[in-house]
Image (spheres, rainbow, N blue to C red):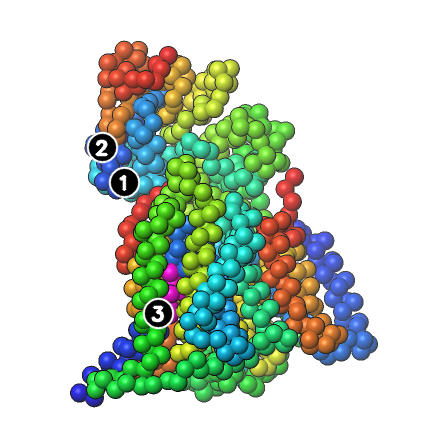
Amino acid sequence: MKVLEVINLEKSFGGVKAVDDVSFFIEQGETFGIIGPNGAGKTTLFNLISGIYTPDNGKIIFKGKDITGFMPYKLSHIGIARTFQNMRLFGSLTVLENILSAVLSKRPYNIFQAVFRTNGYTKGEKNAYNMARELIDFFGLNEKADYPANSLSYGEQRRLELARALATGPSLMLIDEPGAGMNPKEIGDLASMIKTIKDKFSVTIAIIEHQMNLIMNISDRIMAMDFGEVITTSTPQEVKKDKRVIEAYLGEELD
Amino acid sequence: MEQISYILQQVVNGIQLGAVYALIALGYTMVYGVLRLINFAHGDVFMLGAFVAYFLISKFGLPVYLVFILTMVSCALVGYVIEKVAYKPLRDAPKISLLITAVGVSLFLEYFLSLKALFTPNYIPFPKPFEIETYDLSFFVITNVQLLIFIITFISLFILYLLIYKTRYGIAMRAVSYDKETASLMGVGIDGIISFTFIIGASLAGVGGILYGIAYPQINVFMGIMPGIKSFIAAVLGGIGIIHGAVVGGLIIGLCEVFVSAFLSSTFRDGVIFIILFAVLLFRPMGIFGKRIEKV
Amino acid sequence: MRFLKESKQFLVVAFIIYVILKALFVFGVASSYIQQIVQYAVIIALTSIGLNIIYGFTGQFSLGHAAFYGIGAYTSAYLTKVLGIDSLFSYIPVLMACSVISGLIGFLIGIPILKLKDDFLAIATLGFGTLVRVFFDNSDKISDVLGGSRGFVGIPKITNLELVLFFTLFIIVITRHMINSRFGLFWRCIKDDELAASSIGINTANMKLMAFTYGCMLAGFGGAFYANLYTFLHPSNFDILKSIDFLIIVIIGGMGNIVGTILASFIWVGFIEGLRIILPSEVLDIRWVVIPILLIFIMMWRPYGIMAKKTK
């Protein structure tokens, strides 16, 4: 089953086509890699799918439903989560609060229940707390639970952002360059973590990454982009061999 | 016939007020361009200009041209110091901190000058630097004060144009407004440009202050608040960061204010200006001359 | 009493303070002027908590808070005078009406302007404040009772210490429940990073509007109490400078700190009103020269306020 289908998507900024007639689909349960040189339009594509930009043209279909032009919060509610290239955590909130906010955004209780502290409120808060604790545990952030997010190390922040995205209960996760600034050892850990996330939380994953060994390792299929267009979509082995991909990366190493 | 000449008369009066707003609006728009800051203290630099001129004329009886030069120099100095002392230490702080600091500077200037030992919070009559003459041009009358305002504003704008488009500093300033990071990578000294911007903006506000004092000869330490806010609205109306936008915006705001006073009631003039502001922010936030930019 | 559980400590302290104040009032140690100032400080605290929700928690910089305070004040003044209200019992519905009207106007104006950020929001709220001021100045053209620029006179005196204090405590309990629920959490998320907040499923536009409306409602309550405490209103009591007062209180009290806001309100009112009895007027004028300098220093060293909660 197709979880996501993107049809003839277009977006321009000041006359420059950042995303130009892009079409692809993502199957349920797969890991879909997106590669391309800087400025190829990968992040713009994520911003379009997660509702931060509205496309000039084209359609985005999620689980058979046209979601083009939906607001980001609504997309989160129907099951699309994302992380950001430059990590956008709530820096002054604690690790626990960062995750709780994502869990609680699913509206477990209303304002009157909150003001009058009814059973609905207590139950909603308790469930959310338990779920957040589970996630904190899974991502090994137990010791840091009560620390503000901006006091965490780089690697911990990356993990927290993944945890926060998962806390929204997504069926599709868009992960934007999780490996940026990591050493080979950390990249290895990240690869196995993403695989575990996929199995444990049964999510479909779309991932943008520059670290070739990471993306080739975890992806089922890879789409290569350049100048806002799709060059090819294929298995990692095929993509690696593709002449146009190599040309696009000319000067950059493909290892 | 009478109606037409009444309208023409209001146009002349509106341009008189609008010219002063334009001079202040230029400072707002240039500072916003380089710092992305609403310099709330700018209206007070305008007030300071009026007070310096008051002081120079009433205490020393200096000739008008010297009053202009000395007032501009004093205001430029104050603008320079404000930036160095209050804004520069907060260059990387949250935007709202900078905004609150600007409000603080504004309050300080107002209340410091309102001390009894200085000017008090009361209205002070502004001395006449020359006798006011009225010329009847059959359709409307024009005073030598209005002519002075038109001429001085025109000269100021011309000099500003030369500074911004023909000097190295001006070109660098426009580069910084356009893209601060790239400009600094290209070797533009940001600090110098910011100081330059404040100096130019403050001198223009000083000129505005003198002209306002001559035209509406009652000055007060709080006189900068409303003209300051209205000039900022003028800058937003014209497109914030755009030089000619500030001039056009200033003239429109001045004309609107005078027309509302003449045909409705002077008590509504501030209200109308703010309704213009809301309309601009909601329907055309980039102003008349601005281009829509989308960014995250 | 599950409703009061979370604020037990706070309420006990508040009650002790009330007993002490009441004793001072009854035994005539505090002059009627001081009694009035204490009530005024509570009113300022209530209104400032409203601004703290808007600015301190949610990060929406408003320079128009005094307008909503003024709307509450004029509404209450009009209703109590025209309806001839004098009992506490019939005053409660008036209070509610004031809060609802302030909140409703905040809600309606918030829908368009809360899309704006930082300095543009500041200018828009400041603009709204000026519009309201123009409205008050011309209010005699609508109804002569409102007084226009002459001021609104002859408002019934209804506010008393018990009423204002216990009502404010009730509001604080409710406010704390909101802050400690998901709504308060969302407000803080929005302040930190609005885009990230929307990406995790928070309807940021709604939450911002909710914070703004609630803050304006509290200002409406505060204004109503103010009108029925001083029995005279003037448009100049609700201008830009008044909005800046509330802003300074929130900054001194610390963004996102309710107890800090209450303390700061008392310090502020004490500083502005209390010193008036002790110091000669020449010295008093210097206050407003010192305050802005302090404000600038606070921004340089403690940009989130003097009593801002320190993170662990």
The residue singled out by tag 2 in the image is A20
How much space separates mark 1 and mark 3, taking CA atoms?
Answer: 42 Å
Residue drawn where x is 39% and y is 85% of the image: B131
Q: Residue at x 42, y 58 (%)?
A: B200
Front residue of C240 and B9:
B9
Please say whether residue A121 is one of the residues in the magenta stretch: no
Image coordinates of residue A74 in percent, x first then y, are 37, 42
* Residue C186 or residue B288, whichever sits in front: B288
Quarter holding residue A137: top right
Task: Kindly report which numbered mark, 1 or 2, lies closer to the viewer in this rendering.
Answer: 1
Residue at the farthest left position: B1
Residue C156: x and y in percent read: 59, 83
Q: Position of residue A228 (x, y in %)?
A: 26, 30
| Residue B204 in view in this figure | yes
Along the polypeptide, which appears first: circle 1 or circle 2?
1
C10 relative to B81 in the view: left or right: right
Q: Amino acid at mark 2?
A: Asp
Q: Which residue is mark 1?
A: A13
CA distance separating discs 3 and 2: 53 Å
Name the subunit of mark 3.
B
- Residue bearing mark 3: B152
Residue B110 pos. (x, y %): 55, 69
**Is A190 on the left or on the right of B265, as rendered?**
right
Q: Is residue B22 magenta?
A: yes
